Image (cartoon, rainbow, N blue to C red):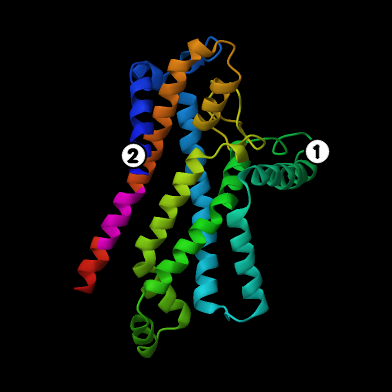
Amino acid sequence: MLLILAILVVDVIRGGSARLSWTFLTKAPSEGMTAGGVFPAIFGTVAMVILMTIAVVPAGVATAIYLHEYADRQAPLTRIIRIAVNNLAGVPSIVFGLFGLGFFIQFVGGGIDKVFFSGNRVLGQPALIWASLTMAVLTLPVVIVATEEALRAVPRELREASLALGATKFQTVLNVVLPQATPGILTGTILAISRGAGEVAPILFTGAAYYLPQLPWHPNNQFMHLGYHVYVLATQSPDVDAAKPILYSTVLVLLAVTFVLNLSAFVVRSRMRHRFAGASV
């Protein structure tokens, strides 16, 4: 596995480093996307991942806390929720794209347009916010499972000590259990970011644009995405040979952006671990 990974990385670096430059990173694509740069795609990818993380982490953590700390494990509702989480983890990503199109865009966005915008298409169309929420649903099982594992790793004695000192169940979870589980929660966040940054199928119907040099400053704007940019260059370019250098460079940038996002979460997780390790000592 390491050998295959090394071959892929070396091939991408060798094919994409020659085209990589400051202009490539800061300019918009031009000339049928065979010239210029990929900055709108970088901006759109990072914006989507940030919005996805803001949406998925609170929902995933809250669900995991309910399942592990409050719910009766033998209750029918708990079993149904766990079955739903397991099924979501196995659903193909393209199905999430169709779900986002039908639920978020047509039902939620279309409903808001009918009520507040007299039927004009403002939110009932592909947009950054709907793509981010679709990716949040896709990565929700990852955050739930990782958070449950983190909660399970917190010693039971800490809970008992907090309750013995007069704290309520909610205070114990909020002030004792959750801080100790934060590094594990951030692990789930890292996994969610890794998957969300590279997925393309869910955003095909929910917000990604073929060519859009303008930056998506509003949540209801469409956006360019590095993964979708790679797909377009590989399948829709009129001149494959001319697009090959920029294709490799875009893949290299996508790997770099994913690495930076993961590294940021990894640094935060490491600091949290050292903080709580020092506090326990």
233 sits to left or right of 105: left
Pinpoint residue 267: horizontal percent, then vertical percent.
29, 50
For badge 2, the amino acid type reads: Leu
Where the C terminus falls, by quadrant? bottom left
55 sits to left or right of 157: right
Which one is closest to the eye, mark 1 or mark 2? 2
| Mark 2, residue position | 3
Please determine whether, in this image, residue 8 is positioned above or below residue 177: above
Between 75 and 13, which is closer to the camera in this rendering?
13
Please determine whether, in this image, residue 140 is positioned above or below residue 81: above
Taking the magenta stretch, the answer to whether it contains residue 271 is yes
Pinpoint residue 42: horizontal percent, then vertical percent.
45, 30
The residue lying at 45 percent from left, 62 percent from top is 146
Residue 175, numbered label = none
The residue lying at 41 percent from left, 61 percent from top is 185
Q: Label 2, secondary structure: give it.
A: helix
Pinpoint residue 199: horizontal percent, then vertical percent.
54, 40
| Mark 1, residue position | 118
Residue range corresponding to the magenta coloring: 265-273
Pinpoint residue 232: horizontal percent, then vertical percent.
57, 23
Disc 1 from disc 2: Cα separation? 58 Å
How many numbered marks are there? Answer: 2
The residue lying at 41 percent from left, 78 percent from top is 172
For badge 1, the amino acid type reads: Ser
Q: Label 1, secondary structure: give it.
A: loop
Where the N terminus falls, by quadrant? top left
Please determine whether, in this image, residue 123 is positioned above or below residue 241: below
